[in-house]
Amino acid sequence: MLCDRKILTRTEAVARTTVLKKDGKIIVFTNGCFDILHVGHIDLLEKAKSRGDVLIVGLNSDESVRCLKGEKRPINSEKDRAEVLAALESVDFVVIFPEDTPAEIIAEIRPQILVKGGDYHIGNIVGRETVESDGGRVVVIPLYEGKSTTGLIEKIKEM
């Protein structure tokens, strides 16, 4: 698939962002499970992209999602979730991480801007200290009202 070149290994992501930063590009990072993509995700990704030049999405691996959301999740495999994200115009690169949090990948990529959705309080955002210690900033994007993967799953169950 054409989008495959936007899905990077951890090593590729670090190498690519190092070059991009040397070229003066502003790297924006956000992360999540993105299990069933919905309009709230699209809104977050577009607003995140608008904060810089390159948007990298850290994607929780299948095992990571199971640890965070339970044994019945994810609905979609990490490969499928990565390809859907990579197909979006606002997403420049996707990197899958196996840990429960993106702390390690953020420390390796060292983005100038870290973006999270409004369900997070700025003081609890993983990677905040790393980004701020480099002079970067953390941005919280208000949630798109009424849209969530959990809500979609519940709606499907009710049908």
Image (tube, rainbow, N blue to C red):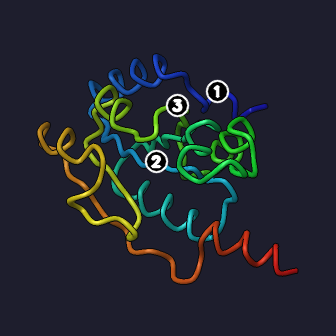
Label count reads: 3
In this rendering, is residue 82 above or below 108? below
In this rendering, is residue 27 above or below 124? above
Residue 113: x and y, percent? 28, 48
Residue type at mark 3 is Pro
Tag in front: 3 or 2: 3
What distance separates the C-alpha of mark 3 from that of mark 1?
A: 20 Å
Q: Secondary structure at mark 1?
A: helix
23 to the left or right of 57: left
Residue holding disc 2: 31
Residue type at mark 2 is Asn
Q: Nearer the viewer, residue 111 or 80?
A: 80
Q: Residue 47 lies in what quarter of the image?
A: bottom left
20 to the left or right of 38: left
Of the two numbered discs 1 and 2 on the same chain, state the one appearing first in sequence: 1
Which residue is found at the position 51% from the left and 50% from the top?
32
Of the two numbered discs 3 and 1 on the same chain, state the one appearing first in sequence: 1
Q: Please identify the residue farthest to the right as the structure is shown.
A: 159
Please say if the residues under marks 3 and 1 sit with CB atoms less than 8 Å apart.
Answer: no
How crowded is the residue under tag 1: few (<14 C-alpha within 10 Å), some, or many (20+)?
few
Residue 45: x and y, percent? 50, 58
Q: Nearer the viewer, residue 99 or 34?
A: 99
Residue 67: x and y, percent? 55, 44
Which residue is found at the position 53% from the left and 36% from the top?
93
Which residue is found at the position 82% from the left and 74% from the top?
157
Q: Secondary structure at mark 3?
A: loop
Residue holding disc 3: 98
Disc assigned to residue 5: 1
How crowded is the residue under tag 2: few (<14 C-alpha within 10 Å), some, or many (20+)?
many
